[in-house]
Image: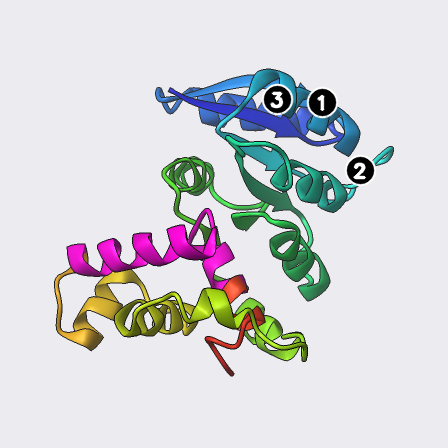
Amino acid sequence: MIKVLLVDDQGVVRAGFRMFLETAGDIEVVGEAANGPEAVRLTRRLAPDVVCMDVRMPGGDGLAATREIAAGAPPVPAVLVVTTFDLDEYVFGALEAGAGGFVLKDTEPDDLVDAVRRLAAGEGLVDQTVTRRVIAEFARRRPVSPPAVDVAEGLTARETEIVRLLADGLSNAEIAAELVVEVSTVKSHLGRAMAKIGTRDRVQTVVWAFRNGVASP
């Protein structure tokens, strides 16, 4: 059973999400919070697998809460930012804070359930309407400080190539076709790369790749 914490300042939104998620059969909503600080406290107490986080909330925004949750002691839950705003600053800010995914509040219920399942499984996602824009923003904001050469050099040539293709927006199947290997081989190399660089999911791996010069525009 996937344990989920819902964070939104509107009770009616939380009620709707609870209904959508719990009818899936393999998802249990273990708690609800109306602001960021409350979300952090409940995350520590309830240990959810996924936190569905709103961005703008009175009494503590979701980006600050996401950053605090992501920096907590393991096991760290995946944070799925669910918001009405698809502006670059919110998308980039959420992922930079450590979120593993980003979807809009008007997403279909089945897509919300799928997003929770994917994050619980260690996969990251970004709403398709903003994916390319997010990648471009990662590239534009890439810091000019020297990359983490010691970590990057710890990757094999094939691991580096796969991380670079992932940052280009390719799926596992597309990467496998590009390199003429099996999808299982891609997953294996990517898993080892993520373990070496310390990322939890595919989206945070993309963030790392742009920050550390492994990927470029």
Q: CA distance from mark 2 to mark 3?
A: 17 Å
Which residues lie in the magenta part?
A: 184-207
Q: Give how far across and how far down residue 17 sits, in percent.
A: 56, 28
Q: Is residue 125 left or right of residue 15?
A: left
Compared with 169, 111 (above or below) is above
Earlier-in-chain disc, 1 versus 3? 3
Residue farthest to the right, as pictured: 59
Pointer 1 and pointer 3: residues touching (CB < 8 Å)?
A: no
Query: Is most of the magenta stretch helix, strand or loop?
Result: helix
Q: Is residue 33 left or right of residue 157?
A: right
Q: Is residue 92 magenta?
A: no
Q: Amino acid at mark 3?
A: Ala
Compared with 25, 135 (above or below) is below
Q: Give how far across and how far down residue 122 sits, in percent.
A: 39, 42
The quarter holding residue 173 reads bottom left
Q: Is residue 209 visible?
A: no
Earlier-in-chain disc, 1 versus 2? 1
Q: CA distance from mark 1 to mark 3?
A: 20 Å
Going 49% across and 68% down the picture, which residue do you hit?
A: 150
Q: Give how far across and how far down residue 69 sits, in percent.
A: 65, 36
Going 13% across and 74% down the picture, which residue do you hit?
A: 180
- For label 3, the crowd category at 10 Å Cα-Cα, with few meaning under 14, some 14 to 19 and many 20 or more, is few
Q: Is residue 198 magenta?
A: yes
Q: Amino acid at mark 1?
A: Arg
